[in-house]
Amino acid sequence: MKTNKYEIDMCNGTILDKLVSFSVPLMLTSILQLLFNAVDIIVVGRFSGSSSLAAVGSTTALIHIFTNLFIGVSLGANVLAARYFATGRKEEMSGAVHTAIAFALLSGIVMVFVGVGISRPALELMDTPDDVIGKSVTYMSIYFCGMPFFMLYNYGAAILRAVGDTKRPLVFLAVAGMANVVLDLLLVIVIPLDVAGVAIGTVASQMVSCVLVLWCLYRTEGSYQLRFSRLKIRWIYLKRIFQVGIPAGIQSTVINFSNALLQSSVNSFGSIAMAGYTAANNIMSFLYAAVNAVTQACMSFTSQNYSVGKHKRMDKILLECLFLSVCFALALGVGAYVFGTGLLGIYSSEAEVIRCGLEILSITTVPYFLCGIMDLIPGALRGMGRSAVPMVLSVIGTVGVRVLWIYVFFPDHRSLYFLFISYPASWIATILMQVVCYLFVRKQCYREMKLKY
């Protein structure tokens, strides 16, 4: 039910144009966020050296492990809010919104203490080199102090996505990102704080985006209006959010655990390889931003149409999302492969760093559309409220293959290229299992919908 110009009617009319209208601003939001994150990496790489670049990069997988469980729960908030919005259940929508925001605040505060306390032991477990670990701990400790802002922004943006509003979060992030760039330049070049400077800039920008998204929710006249006096965790809504969000969060956390194992293997090659991986991984993040935007669109559209019993429209949504995801991933993946040397040169001028980065990009970029397909099918299943089974399959397919690769095959073929063959191999294995799962769950869900409607 559309009530203002920022919302999208996902249950009626044409689909492809609305998917594009939803996913492109979301994609630009993610890419913009990555560009601002890339500024962090570029500034420290250019003005503080490869050890600082490696220090920031070595924390990425760890940060994702600790944050993605709670970010996954925000997907549950998105699915629940989309259902309530599509069916016009205003009281339930309000309860879900206030529960989600209250949980975001609480989890953000908890993450401050967890992240600061565990940063050094976790980095030591990953065999982070001695010449890097001190800076890595500094970066992580400051970064985690901004977790309350980070969580509130992500949960607020998830609620806006549930009603089709992906345009205002784009504006909010643009404002916050510009603040991040200014602070990076000030705190690294003018005031030489090294990795601490970029961490402070990141926390400040997260605070800006958090304030803007909460202000947006407060000012809206819709059923998702936020009132701070009503912030309260209500178990009935939290339980429903957890049903979808916890499996999604566990899936993301465990997959990032496998990435942390990969990071440990990269660390064994030294700080130059770590810097190359940091740059290559940042480039791959742009590819993921594109395919994940389509996945988010698929989840929101599927959730709304599932709630009103339009199963044939759900089939069309998945097919058109597959088309968009493959097109976006192929275009960006081929571009990253062709222009890899120039792109890596933005992050570092050191020839060995660029060589290591190219070794990784050569096996991961062109087949990246497989990652998009792998990401999309669980998104459709979450939209139907089925999140546990795709979580298990993703963990088995992605993590299982990568762990097997790292500990069985990699020791006898030690090269970055061979190590990262595990990426496309794990994508293919996971897709095969997910397709079988989707066909089974689809049949079960549509039988339930026919009985209900």
Image: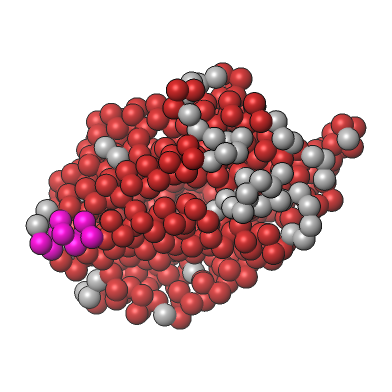
The N terminus sits in image quarter:
top right
Q: From the viewer's perspective, is residue 385 above or below residue 399?
A: above
Residue located 26% across and 66% down the image: 42
User: Toward which corner of the image does residue 449 lie, by quadrant?
Assistant: top right
Q: Residue furthest top?
A: 235
List x then y, in percent, for residue 103: 46, 27
Q: Left or right of 11: which side holds 228?
A: left
The magenta segment is: 182-190
The C terminus sits in image quarter:
top right
List x then y, in percent, for residue 325: 62, 63
The front one of 309 and 166 is: 166
Residue located 45% across and 81% down the image: 338
List x then y, in percent, for residue 302: 71, 47
| In magenta stretch: residue 185 | yes
Q: From the viewer's perspective, is residue 165 above or below residue 85?
A: below
The front one of 281 and 319 is: 319
Residue located 79% across and 57% down the image: 13
Residue located 55% across and 32% down the image: 97
Q: Left or right of 415: which side holds 201?
A: left
Q: Left or right of 26: which side holds 171?
A: left
User: Toward which corner of the image does residue 244 lie, by quadrant?
Assistant: top right
Asked whether residue 78 is in view, the answer is yes
Q: Left or right of 227: which side holds 319?
A: right
List x then y, in percent, for residue 434: 68, 48
Question: What colour scheme does the image use?
Answer: secondary structure
| In magenta stretch: residue 206 | no
Asked whether residue 384 is in view, the answer is no
